[in-house]
Image (cartoon, rainbow, N blue to C red):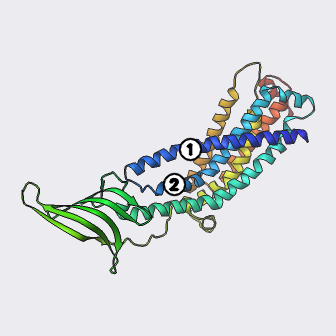
Amino acid sequence: MVFHRSLTRELTFTAVGVFVVLLAILVTTQTINLLGRAAEGRIANEAVAALIGFWSLGLFPLLLILTVFISTLVVLTRVWRDHEMAVWLSSGIGLKDWIWPLLRFALPFAAIVALLTLYVSPWAAYRSKEYAEVLKQREEMSAISPGIFKESGSANRVYFIEQYSALHGTARQVFMQEISEGKVATILARAGKVTTNEHGERVLELNDGRRYVGTPGQADVEEAHFERYRVILGEAPPTIGEITHIQSRPTTALLASDAPSDKAELAWRLSLPAACVLLALLALPLSYFNPRSGHTYNLVYALIAFLLYQNALTLVRNWIGSGQLPPATMAAVHLALLALTLALVWLRSQPAAPLTRTLAALVRKA
């Protein structure tokens, strides 16, 4: 039908625009945050792009759900505002006839959300946590941003480098100050890198530099020039163990677990595809707009409905995780929203009448 094709085409074009805008806003915000942390030396510069990628993959399900809801609401509100809905209603196409085109639009998004939520997002969360652990276990000098003074984790060394090559793992123009046994050692070197010796110890190798050792408050300072200078930093970091963050656990592991927290996470993952479809249907009655009034209160109602629905899902997930409710309770929230949506569609399909009169007629029929 022309009606189905035109609606699907407009929804698709609007969804692409909404998704691009939402993704650009969120990625820009996260990029600024990570660049600030990199400038402070809290993360390595080369880690910014990878962390943004992992973070974006984990955020895609929520972005797609918001895209479906917002695009459906915007398109249907425009249909009411431009009197197109009046034309369709007068031609015999009621509100219930809009349900199937909306499902055709929302179901592919729901399938993508299911794929991301059940498989891709846990993998991205695991890799992100793993990458963060790797960065934590790297020697401090490799995580220094050039031009920034950085204190070591043990608080007994301060580093400063002018250049760092992530490809070769070497630093140029290295400054290091170390406090040991009441003496301060200051080292200036042209180059340096961190290696691991045959005993499994991390060794800082500095080339072509000078070392100054002295006691604060005293004039005697020892000066020495070296071609190669090695400092044992400590034992090599242990192999990264299993990351137990619940959001990074595979769905198969959640299915095999009886822990309430795992059941809550599984129920949450399964609820996101359903939420994608239900919010698209909810936008149908909430998009009602009276062009004569000039007020778009329906957008406020839609925002309130979305926040209530999201908070209800989050609250039920927390109760399931604490063992207060069974996992099937999550389905009750979806069924309640579905019942509310169908009731609103039925009310909007009735002839114009005050709400009290409509409710009274509904009670008499019951």
| On screen, residue 40 above or below 74 | below
> To which quarter of the image does residue 58 belong?
bottom right
Give the residue number, with chain letter if any, for mark 2: 49
* Residue 119 image position (x, y, % from top left): 64, 62
Q: Please state which of residues 23 and 60 is positioned toward the viewer in this rendering.
A: 23
| On screen, residue 207 above or below 297 | below
- SS state under label 1: helix
As shown in the figure, which amino acid type bears the numbered disc 1? Leu
As shown in the figure, which amino acid type bears the numbered disc 2? Ala
Residue at x 60% of width, y 49% of height: 316
* Residue 296 image position (x, y, % from top left): 69, 25
Give the residue number, with chain letter if any, for mark 1: 26
Q: Please state which of residues 318 and 129 is positioned toward the viewer in this rendering.
A: 129
Q: CA distance from mark 1 to mark 2?
A: 14 Å
Residue at x 14% of width, y 62% of height: 213
Residue 31, visible in the rendered structure:
yes
| On screen, residue 106 above or below 347 | below
The C terminus lies in which quarter of the figure? top right
Q: Residue furthest left?
A: 219
Which circle's residue, 1 or 2, is located before the other in the chain? 1
Residue 331 left/right relative to 50: right
Q: Residue furthest top?
A: 292
Residue 363, visible in the rendered structure:
no
